[in-house]
Amino acid sequence: ASTVLRAATVGAADALGVLATRGTLAPGKVADLVATTRDPEQDLDALKRPSLVVLRGRVLARPDLDALLEDLAARQARVADEAARPLE
């Protein structure tokens, strides 16, 4: 699991050419964080339902994340409905 986490953080930042500013927690770097109740190095499934996320400086607690997921599901349903309509 630690290899997967490193690939998704440091490895991704390196591949995108932004390792100097992202990918690890260090002073002066941009840090988006995921907080879990279990250690993701022991159980990657812990990442499926984070307790909170810090994204671009905005803290998203579990209720905020649930609301975003509900909104996404509603948007996906609308797109699927539109795609299923016959062309006129």
Image (cartoon, rainbow, N blue to C red):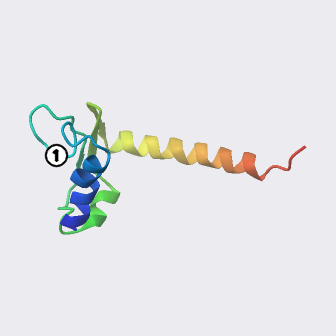
Question: Does residue 48 appear to the left or right of 86 in the view shown?
Answer: left
Is residue 75 visible to the viewer in this orientation of the structure? yes
Q: x, y percentage for residue 87?
A: 86, 46
Q: x, y percentage for residue 18?
A: 26, 40
Question: Does residue 75 appear to the left or right of 64 in the view shown?
Answer: right
Question: Does residue 12 appear to the left or right of 71 in the view shown?
Answer: left
User: Foreground residue, 31 or 16?
Assistant: 16
User: Foreground residue, 14 or 68?
Assistant: 14
Q: Looking at the rendering, in which quadrant would you find the C terminus?
A: top right
Q: Single out the residue that lies furthest toward the right.
A: 88
Q: Quadrant of residue 56?
A: top left
Residue drawn 41% across and 46% down?
66
User: Crowdedness of circle 1 by 10 Å Cα count: few (<14), some, many (20+)?
Assistant: some
Residue drawn 19% across and 61% down?
38
Which residue carries the number 1 mark?
Answer: 24
Q: Single out the residue that lies furthest toward the left.
A: 27
Q: Amino acid at mark 1?
A: Thr
Q: Secondary structure at mark 1?
A: loop
Q: Looking at the rendering, in which quadrant would you find the N terminus?
A: bottom left
Question: How many numbered circles does the render carry?
Answer: 1
Residue drawn 74% across and 45% down?
82
Is residue 51 visible to the viewer in this orientation of the structure? no
Q: Quadrant of residue 32?
A: top left
Q: x, y percentage for residue 74?
A: 59, 44
Q: x, y percentage for residue 77?
A: 64, 49
